[in-house]
Amino acid sequence: MSATNASALRPDANTFLTHVFGRGLQDKTYVVERYRTTIDGAIRQQPGGKGHPLTLSLATVRELRPARNEILICKGEKKPDSGIQYWGDRAAWGHMLERGRFPG
């Protein structure tokens, strides 16, 4: 296991995965969907502002950091193939264990 992976597995590590899709962040506004993982491995969509996804500016999306058990998906509003996905450290960890993607 590399030093990078070892430090990411510490309980006190504050890390998250980022997945850029399509053209990346090339839109001015983004529709943001929030999901939370539960202790039993379920992923549940969280409401954002009265049950609807949030619409945020590019500057705000760049500053987003998911909670430890949160997944954020940001899709371009006018360019839907522009976007980014953030996985919190525990959400990503559970996903890797469940799928047999243990690093190392």
Image (spheres, helix red, strand yellow):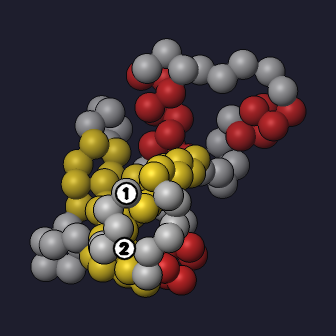
- Residue 65's quadrant in the figure? bottom right
Q: Is residue 99 visible?
A: yes
Q: Is residue 88 visible?
A: no
Q: Secondary structure at mark 1?
A: loop
Q: Is residue 35 above or below residue 2?
A: below
Q: Secondary structure at mark 2?
A: strand
Residue at left 42%, top 62%? 82
Residue at left 30%, top 79%? 55
**Could you say where residue 41 lies in the image, as x and y percent from the top left?**
32, 33
**Could you say where residue 7 lies in the image, as x and y percent from the top left?**
78, 39
**Could you say where residue 25 lies in the image, as x and y percent from the top left?**
51, 67
| Nearer-N-terminus badge (1/2) | 2
The residue wearing badge 2 is: 30
Q: Amino acid at mark 2?
A: Tyr
Residue at left 50%, top 27%? 96
Q: Is residue 81 above or below residue 13?
A: below
Residue at left 78%, top 32%? 6
Looking at the picture, tell me which residue is in the foreground, 88 or 73. Answer: 73
The residue wearing badge 1 is: 81
Left or right of residue 2: residue 67: left
Instruction: Farthest residue to the left: give it.
Output: 51
